[in-house]
Image: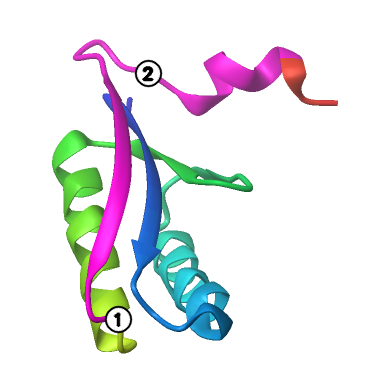
Amino acid sequence: MANANLSLQVLPRVPEEQLYGVVERVIEMIQNSGLPYVVGPMETTIEGDIEVLLDLVKRAHDICIAAGASAVMSVVKIDYRPGGVTIDEKIRKYRP
């Protein structure tokens, strides 16, 4: 079982008209990771092993820089539980 949920909001320093395109590249990388995730309007939450999740944050920054960002700021929230934690247990009752 996954031992962490990590919510990531990336804020690449790019011209405004390029912002969504860069963020979409980060979301595509998260999708391709094979990990469970939920995209929200302000951040994406991913479920997995803490080490793997922290590596995804680094990769997200690398993607932003490769896409032309002069800098990247991120907001990261982590819920770490050695016994396991899932996204589903937190939001299941709110899903239709």
- Identify the image quadrant of the C terminus: top right
User: Residue 76 falls in which quadrant of the image?
Assistant: top left
Query: Where's residue 71, x and y in %?
Result: 22, 72
What is the three-letter code of the residue carrying label 1?
Answer: Ala
Q: Note whether 27 is above or below 95 in the view shown.
A: below
The circle drawn on residue 69 is 1
- Identify the image quadrant of the N terminus: top left
* Number of marks: 2
Q: How crowded is mark 2: few (under 14 residues within 10 Å), some or many (20 or more)?
A: some
Q: What element carries label 2?
A: loop
Sooner in the amino-acid sequence: mark 2 or mark 1: 1
User: Residue 78 falls in which quadrant of the image?
Assistant: top left
The circle drawn on residue 85 is 2
Query: Where's residue 46, x and y in %?
Result: 41, 42
Observer-side mark, 2 or 1, equals 1
User: Residue 88 falls in which quadrant of the image?
Assistant: top right
What is the three-letter code of the residue carrying label 2?
Answer: Val
Point out the stretch of residues depicted in magenta: 70-93
Nearest the viewer among 56 and 41 is: 41
Q: Which residue is at 35% across, 69% downward?
A: 12
Q: Which residue is at 19% across, 14% downward?
A: 82
Q: Note whether 48 is above or below 96 in the view shown.
A: below
Query: Where's residue 28, x and y in %?
Result: 48, 70
Q: Note whether 28 is above or below 10 in the view shown.
A: below
